[in-house]
Image (cartoon, rainbow, N blue to C red):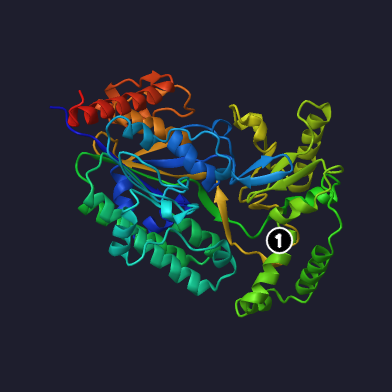
């Protein structure tokens, strides 16, 4: 009888080898050290730009942003930008959907691209973008069970304002609390339910590194706790038939030193023209005074003590300097380019069939490189393909440590910089378990490769529209995974599979009712 195969993906949002390797060398992450020595590890190249959304969606579908319809948290609609989940045209099949349709029982918990839990062959918990908390879990009754296990299940830190302007000590303690809640939840699910495939994500490394990059004691504590949690899972949850993947959606690095204020740059060069706004002009002047008098730290320390009414005024005024607030202030008749989003992607406000479109892109690339050195700037067609290419950003800047380590679409808030760390292209990849090479280093692994590799491990065909490949180099040569050749099918295979399963269930129900 062929042995059963199980697979477990443990996502560590924002985890980076630049921290893990340093701590392993200091003897502080014994579990990760064991996994590296007895498994296959290396970099996992993220999407460009390397953002949580769409990175987890790309990982779970094997499709590039041009096929899923978004390259950041938002989608452009004419002169408006809306959250991607408000206009998610086609819910592409995730890896757990394909496995579920093949009678595999799945557990999916806290994966960021799940903004509403839905029926699968197993259980599901939505991620931090969950819109309606009545749809946080599937089945709905699972939420009550989680509350009993954890006291109260918390998907993530409540608001971006808490993460940025909140008191550092309170934010950090809240992250530790949520980390513990998530671990209790994941352990409960993996022990309580029979499963073939699990996909769970700890978001806390990302949150802490954004706010505390450079505060190595706090960051070390997060990794130390995760290392202990991994040990508990290996001891109590993972069986000998389980292949374990530990992955991150992107890496991390400094984010508050070399900042490109992209919309400010576009305004100075005449690409972006704003309408007159008195509140914005007053606030810019106030920030200039704060910077001149070097009152940055005093102001930030005081903000936390302001009453809620003042916080509201500050938020409303501050929006005039953010990319979301700038949209209503743009003079579209005079604007050729603007940046929107959390990373500073650039949209050209000229039809792509107009010759000036390409002239503007090329000119802008030259001006940016002249100002900031040999930075990496991509045209969208160089890195994306698919039916939604026209809706994606026209230019994408990739940050690094040398030239630019953060891009912001906001205006003139560098003296009140809210985050210390920023995303990097390379996340982590680690595979461990039966059939996986030991002590092996992998190169050229991409985030697109996870979904096809998982399907191959289960002996299932791979949709031929996936952009990734099976990471065959991670398998031991005499393993079943290495001997088996990847099989590719039309994407409709899994649609038909789902229809066949519905028909089987309908016939079964009719038989039970005595109607057949």
Q: Residue at x 39, y 28 (%)?
A: 470
Above/below status of 83 relative to 150: above
User: Outermost residue toward the left?
Assistant: 1
Above/below status of 506 relative to 364: above
Task: Give how far across and how far down residue 291 sits, in percent.
Answer: 76, 71
User: Outermost residue toward the front?
Assistant: 515
Q: Nearer the viewer, residue 234 or 120?
A: 120
Q: 307 left or right of 137? A: right
Task: Give how far across and how far down residue 248 sits, in percent.
Answer: 44, 47
Q: Hey, which quadrant is residue 296 in on the image?
A: bottom right
Instruction: Residue 9: tell me if it is visible.
Output: yes
**Residue named by callout 1:** 319
Above/below status of 151 relative to 338: below
Q: Hey, which quadrant is residue 484 in on the image?
A: top left
Task: Give how far across and how far down residue 383 sits, in percent.
Answer: 60, 32
Q: Residue at x 40, y 25 (%)?
A: 495
Q: Nearer the viewer, residue 233 or 283?
A: 283
Q: Residue at x 33, y 33 (%)?
A: 99
Q: Tally the marks.
A: 1
Quarter of the picture holding the N terminus: top left
Above/below status of 155 relative to 50: below
Q: 377 left or right of 201? A: right
Q: Nearer the viewer, residue 327 or 452?
A: 327
Q: Residues within 10 Å of mark 1 (few under 14, many from 20)?
A: some
Task: Give how far across and how far down residue 180 sits, in percent.
Answer: 35, 63
Q: Hey, which quadrant is residue 365 in on the image?
A: top right
């Amino acid at each position: 009888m062929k042995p059963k195969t199980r697979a477990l993906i443990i996502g560590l949002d924002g985890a980076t080898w630049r921290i893990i390797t340093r701590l392993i060398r200091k003897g502080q992450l014994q579990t990760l050290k064991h996994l590296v020595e007895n498994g296959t590890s290396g970099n996992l190249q993220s999407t460009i730009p390397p953002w949580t959304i769409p990175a987890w969606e790309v990982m779970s579908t094997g499709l590039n942003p041009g096929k899923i319809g978004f390259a950041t948290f938002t989608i452009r609609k004419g002169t408006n930008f809306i959250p991607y989940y408000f206009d998610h045209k086609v819910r592409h099949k995730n890896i757990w959907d394909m496995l579920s349709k093949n009678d595999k029982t799945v557990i999916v918990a806290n994966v960021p691209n799940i903004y509403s839990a839905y029926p699968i062959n197993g259980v599901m918990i939505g991620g931090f973008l969950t819109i309606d908390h009545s749809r946080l879990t599937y089945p709905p009754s699972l939420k009550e069970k989680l509350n009993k296990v954890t006291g109260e299940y918390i998907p993530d830190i409540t608001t971006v304002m808490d993460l940025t302007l909140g008191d550092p000590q309170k934010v950090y303690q809240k992250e530790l609390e949520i980390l513990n809640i998530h671990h209790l939840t994941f352990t409960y699910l993996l022990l309580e339910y029979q499963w073939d495939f699990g996909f769970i994500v700890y978001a806390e490394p990302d949150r802490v590194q954004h706010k505390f990059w450079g505060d190595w004691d706090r960051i070390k504590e997060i990794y130390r706790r995760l290392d202990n949690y991994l040990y508990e899972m290996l001891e109590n949850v993972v069986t000998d038939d389980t292949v374990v993947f530990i992955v991150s959606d992107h890496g991390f690095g400094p984010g508050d030193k070399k900042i490109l204020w992209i919309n400010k740059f576009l305004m100075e060069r005449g690409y972006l023209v704003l309408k007159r706004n008195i509140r914005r002009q007053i606030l810019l002047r106030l920030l200039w005074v704060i910077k001149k008098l070097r009152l940055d730290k005093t102001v930030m320390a005081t903000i936390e003590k302001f009453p809620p009414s003042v916080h509201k005024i500050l938020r409303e005024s501050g929006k005039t300097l953010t990319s979301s607030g700038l949209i209503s202030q743009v003079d579209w008749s005079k604007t050729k380019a603007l940046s929107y989003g959390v990373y500073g992607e650039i949209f050209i406000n000229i039809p792509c069939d107009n010759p000036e479109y390409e002239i503007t892109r090329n000119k802008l690339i030259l001006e940016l490189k002249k100002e900031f050195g040999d930075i990496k700037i991509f045209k969208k067609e160089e890195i994306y393909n698919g039916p939604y290419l026209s809706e994606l950003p026209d230019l994408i800047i990739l940050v690094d440590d040398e030239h630019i380590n953060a891009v912001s679409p906001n205006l003139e808030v560098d003296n009140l910089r809210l985050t210390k760390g920023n995303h990097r292209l390379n996340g982590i990849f680690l595979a461990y378990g039966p059939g996986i090479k030991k002590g092996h280093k992998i190169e050229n692994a991409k985030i697109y490769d996870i979904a096809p590799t998982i399907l191959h491990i289960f002996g299932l065909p791979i949709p031929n529209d996936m952009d990734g490949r099976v990471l065959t180099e991670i398998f031991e040569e005499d393993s079943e995974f290495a001997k088996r050749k990847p099989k590719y099918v039309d994407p409709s295979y899994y649609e038909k599979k789902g229809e066949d399963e519905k028909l089987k269930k309908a016939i079964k129900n009719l038989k039970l009712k005595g109607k057949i």
